[in-house]
């Protein structure tokens, strides 16, 4: 998602998109499956899975649906091998760049849906590697409400010792960034410190943001919203300012 937009309309898209993502059992199930596939089905040993389960529960996802999604990831489900994770790169309005991560059981469907959304919104599919170099692939732990002000220095030092490379304060949350292989340790440390971990995932962070005019910025935000609404799309990352 793009951040720090200077237009209220563009900012509003982020809240709407996040709400839709949280409410989608399909997306939550696929996140559970991938987390279980990567690090195993025991949430006590897999912090990404533990966080994903917490998010699914907060969204009132049924317990049996959570268990099926985890079983699918560990290989004990009937369709365990079905989920794949294609990544698409694109150029959006205003010269902005997009990385579109999918979780799907049908690659042809997800590719067609993504290409259609791009073509209908003034964007073009890019060749592999032509966009990703503009981003850093990092582990990101999200803390709604930010770090506690009364013990911030102590918390920051503990997180840095665990592998955090940067802590970014946003309007209503904080991002703890780290190398990908340090994600589990940083997330576990955050939880031990009593922080409310909303998510712990690998994300594409833009190295520089691209300024556009309001028209192009709104077009890019509308495209991101349309992509995020697709069931097969897990995340969309942008360098829109």
Image (cartoon, helix red, strand yellow):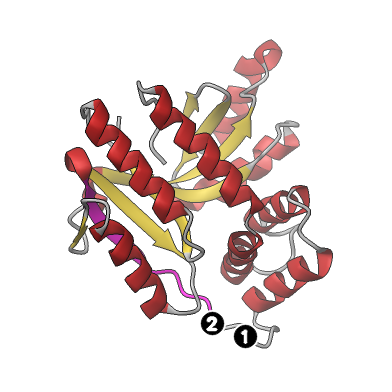
State the image coordinates of residue 8 (x, y, percent, origin top left): 42, 23
In the rendered image, residue 88 lying in the magenta stretch gets the answer yes
- Category of crowding for the residue at label 2, using alpha-carbon neighbours closer than 10 angstroms: few (below 14), some (14–19), many (at least 20): few
Which residue: 53% across, 39% down? 16
Q: Is residue 120 left or right of residue 46?
A: left
Tags 1 and 2 in contact by the CB under 8 Å rule? yes
Q: Which residues are magenta?
A: 83-92
Which residue: 63% across, 49% down? 22
Q: Secondary structure at mark 2?
A: loop
Which residue: 36% across, 26% down? 5
Residue 120 is drawn in which quadrant? bottom left
State the image coordinates of residue 109 (x, y, percent, origin top left): 40, 76
Which residue: 62% across, 69% down? 33
Residue topped by disc 1? 79
Q: Is residue 228 left or right of residue 134?
A: right
Residue at mark 1 to residue at mark 2: CA–CA distance: 6 Å
């Amino acid at each position: 998602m793009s951040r720090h937009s200077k237009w209220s309309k563009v900012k509003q898209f982020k809240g709407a998109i996040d709400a839709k993502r949280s409410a989608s059992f399909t997306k939550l199930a696929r996140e559970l499956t991938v987390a279980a596939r990567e690090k195993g089905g025991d949430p006590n040993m897999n912090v990404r899975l533990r966080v994903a389960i917490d998010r699914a529960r907060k969204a009132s996802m049924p317990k049996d649906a959570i268990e099926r999604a985890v079983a699918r990831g560990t290989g004990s489900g009937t369709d365990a091998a079905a989920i794949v994770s294609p990544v698409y790169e694109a150029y959006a309005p205003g010269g902005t760049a997009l990385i579109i991560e999918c979780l799907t059981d049908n690659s042809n469907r997800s590719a067609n849906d993504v290409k259609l959304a791009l073509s209908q919104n003034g964007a073009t599919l890019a060749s592999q590697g032509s966009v990703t170099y503009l981003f850093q692939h990092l582990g990101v732990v999200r803390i709604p409400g930010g770090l506690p002000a009364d013990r911030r220095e102590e918390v920051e030092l503990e997180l840095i010792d665990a592998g955090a490379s940067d802590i970014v304060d946003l309007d209503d949350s904080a991002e703890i960034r780290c190398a990908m292989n340090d994600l589990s340790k940083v997330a576990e440390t955050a939880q031990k410190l009593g922080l409310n971990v909303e998510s712990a995932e690998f994300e594409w962070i833009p190295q520089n943001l691209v300024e556009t005019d309001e028209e192009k910025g709104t077009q890019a935000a509308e495209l991101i919203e349309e992509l995020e609404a697709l069931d097969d799309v897990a995340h969309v990352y942008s360098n829109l300012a």
